[in-house]
Amino acid sequence: MESPSNTVLLSAGTKCAAAQCGLHDYLPFKCQFCKESFCSSHFRPATHHCEKEVNQDRVAPPCPLCSTPVTIPIGEDPNIAMERHFDNACEVMGRKRNAAPRCARHKCKNVLITPIRCESCKELFCPTHRHPSTHRCTPTISPGKSDTRDNSKVEPQTSRSRSNAGASSSTSKFSGASLLGRQAPRPATTAQQTPKGPSKPAFTTPAAGVSGGTPSSTIHNPFSKVDRRAKAEMESKRKAMTERARKGLLSEKEKEIFAREEALLAQAQGQNSKDCVVM
C-alpha cells in the first residue's frame, strides 16, 4: 500500500513509456519523433522501437545525375521531390540554380547577404572589402572619355592611311607616266626641264628621261639601278623597233617615232660623252 509520502514522490516524476521498463524517472527524456517520455536507458529511438522515426527520417538522397543532396519534406514521396529537382535545379539537365551573389574580391567569394556596390568599379563586395583600397579598385571609364580616347587613336591611323594612299597614288602616277612615255614619246619641246643652277647639279629621275624622251642637261648616275633598268628597257624597245623596221613591218606613224628615237639616242650618246662623273 502506497504511503502519502510515496504518492507525492510519484507525482514529481514520469513513468518510462517503454513496455518492458515501466521505470518511474524523475528526469525523463522525451523522444523527438513520438514525443513520449523515457528513461535514460530507452530514450533513443532504436531502444524503444519508435514507429514514427521512419516517417520523419530527414536523410537527403543525392541526385543520380549531379550528386547534389535533395531535401525531401516530411510526409512527401521521395520520387516527387526528385522529379522537382530534375525540373528546376539539376545542372546536368540544364537547369541552373539562382546562385547568390558573392564578393568580387579575388580569393574572398563570401555570399553577400547585403551586397555593397563600389561607386568606382561598380562591383559587389562584402562589408570587409567594400573600400576601394581593399579590393584593387579599377575605376570604370565614362562613355565620353572612352570616345575621346578612341578618336585620338583613330585620327593618327586615318592620317597615316591618307599618307599611304597618297604615296600609292603618286607611285601609280609615276608608273603610268613611264608606261605612256615608253609607248608614245612626246615631242622634245614639251618635256624640257629648267635646271636650278650650275652650282647644284641634280640627278634626274628615270621617269623624266623615259617619258619625255629628251636628253637631260644634268648628270646621270651610272650606278643607279633605276637608270640602268630604264636604259635596258629603252635598248630592248629600240632593238625591237629596229628588227621590225628591217622586216618592213612599221607603219608610217611608227616610222616617225623610230626616226625620232634614233635621233634622240644619237644626241644622248653625244651628250654622255661630254659628261664626266667624279666618284
Image (cartoon, rainbow, N blue to C red):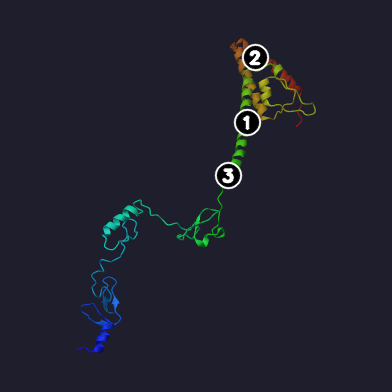
Q: Amino acid at mark 1?
A: Gly
State the separation of the CA atoms marked 2 and 3.
66 Å
Q: Residue at x 62, y 11 (%)?
A: 253
Horizontal side of residue 60 vs 248, given as left or right: left
Q: For mark 1, does the 10 Å Cα neighbourhood hold few (<14), some (14 to 19), or many (20 or more) residues?
A: few
Q: Which residue is mark 3?
A: 144
Number of marks present in the image shown: 3
Q: Residue at x 68, y 20 (%)?
A: 212
Kindly identify which numbered label has been placed on residue 166.
1
Of mark 2 and mark 1, the one earlier in the sequence is 1
State the separation of the CA atoms marked 1 and 3.
33 Å
Quarter of image, res 170? top right
Residue 73: x and y, percent?
30, 62
Quarter of image, res 144? top right
Q: Amino acid at mark 2?
A: Ile
Kindly identify which numbered label has been placed on residue 262.
none
Of mark 1 and mark 3, the one earlier in the sequence is 3
